[in-house]
Structures are given as C-alpha cells and as structure tokens.
Image (cartoon, rainbow, N blue to C red):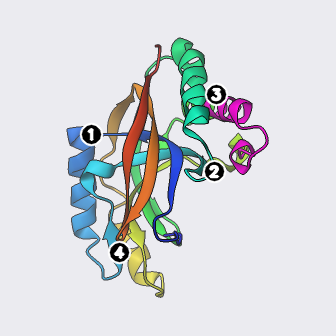
Amino acid sequence: MKQWAPGHTGYYWYLTFDDSELIELAADCQKALAIGGIDPVPLDALHITMMGIGATTVVSSEQIDRLVSLAGKCLSDAKPFDLSVGPLSGSRSAIRFSVAPWDQLLDLHQVLSTCTAAVLPNSSAGAVSGPSRFRPHLGIAYNNTDRAAVHVIAAVTALRGARCVSVRVKQVELVVLRRDGHSYRWDTRAVLALGG
C-alpha cells in the first residue's frame, strides 16, 4: 500500500460495489488468505479505481463542480454494463480479482480522462495516464509486510479456481479518498449514472 502523508485526501473516480455475491466471494477469499501482514479491504469498500484526479489541497471545489457537470453530460450516452469478477491474482502490494471484459471499462476510463483533462489542463491532475497504463482490477487485500512471496502465491493459487461473479456497472462515483489505518475509506462527492 502506498504511503500517504497524515491527513492527505484526494479526489478519485471510483466504481463501487455492494453486490451480495461479490461480497460473499470476497469474504470467502479473505478468510482463506488469513496470513499475517495482509490487510483485507473492508467489504463495504470494494471498488475499482478508475483514476486519480488530484489532491484536495490542489483541486478546488469549483473545479470539481465543473468536472462533475461535464462528466455527467459526457456519460449521458453511456450504457450500464456487466463485468465478470475473478479469478484471484496478485501483485507486490495487493491481492485482487481480475475483471473482464475491459472494453467498456477502457471506454469509460477514456471519457473520464478526457473530462478531467478538459477541466484541469494545467495541473498534475490533468496529466492523466492513458489507457495503456490503466489495468482494471478489484482489490480485496493489501500486503503491508516485507516477505518472501512464496506463501502468498501459494494461498492465491489455491483460490484461483474460486467461482467468478457478475456485477452490473450502472454509475461512477467521484470520491474524496483518505487513508484510515491500513485501509482506504472515502466520502462520495458525486454519483453519475451511466445513461443519465
């Protein structure tokens, strides 16, 4: 998990999920991954990070209002879509579910990137990474301990055959993200429905 300065908050575009099958799958996997130094993502905080916008100390409320208005207009033609969540995989810092297909996620990322760059062209928030750097996934745990990876790899491998679940993406949230202990929490600033 990346280091955040105390009190740091930032604006992000998120997809959030409260689907009961997904929560059950995540809970089952988290239970099976009870290895020291692995911090589970709270089950009420399952999400896909679409992109960062900028620190709340840099991006003004007025800019966020303009961004929400523009993105709402741009997303009015977008359609809700389904994602398959699973199987489980991992990286240096996180254990996560793969999500597929990527096509509509990449389209959504492009819309959000274009809107963000239009409102924040001269800030670091406007320097949005392109789709080639966007790797959609849904995290369920963070690795906060330096360790040999062999035990984590074995635990994740044992869960690779777990069922996949389908979730519906109907909206995008603009959130104010903060670090709370070993997890990230947020307050929702705006909810934009796909298809207006």
Q: Which residue is mark 4?
A: 38
Q: Residue at the location (45% across, 82% down)?
A: 150
- Under mark 3, the amino acid is Val
Report helix, strand or loop for mark 1.
loop
C-alpha span from label 2 to label 4: 32 Å
* Apparent side of residue 186 relative to residue 90 in the rendered image (left or right): left
Q: Residue at the location (46% across, 87% down)?
A: 147
- Under mark 4, the amino acid is Ile
Q: Please state which of the two labelled residues, at mark 2 or mark 4, is closer to the viewer.
A: 2
C-alpha span from label 3 to label 2: 22 Å
Q: Which residue is mark 1?
A: 18
Q: Which residue is mark 3?
A: 111
Q: Point out the tag, 2 or 1, that comes first from the N-terminus.
A: 1
Q: Residue at the location (43% across, 31% down)?
A: 190
Counting other residues with Cα less than 10 Å from the Cα at mark 1, is it few (<14), some (14-19), or many (20 or more)? few
3 and 4 marks in contact (CB < 8 Å): no
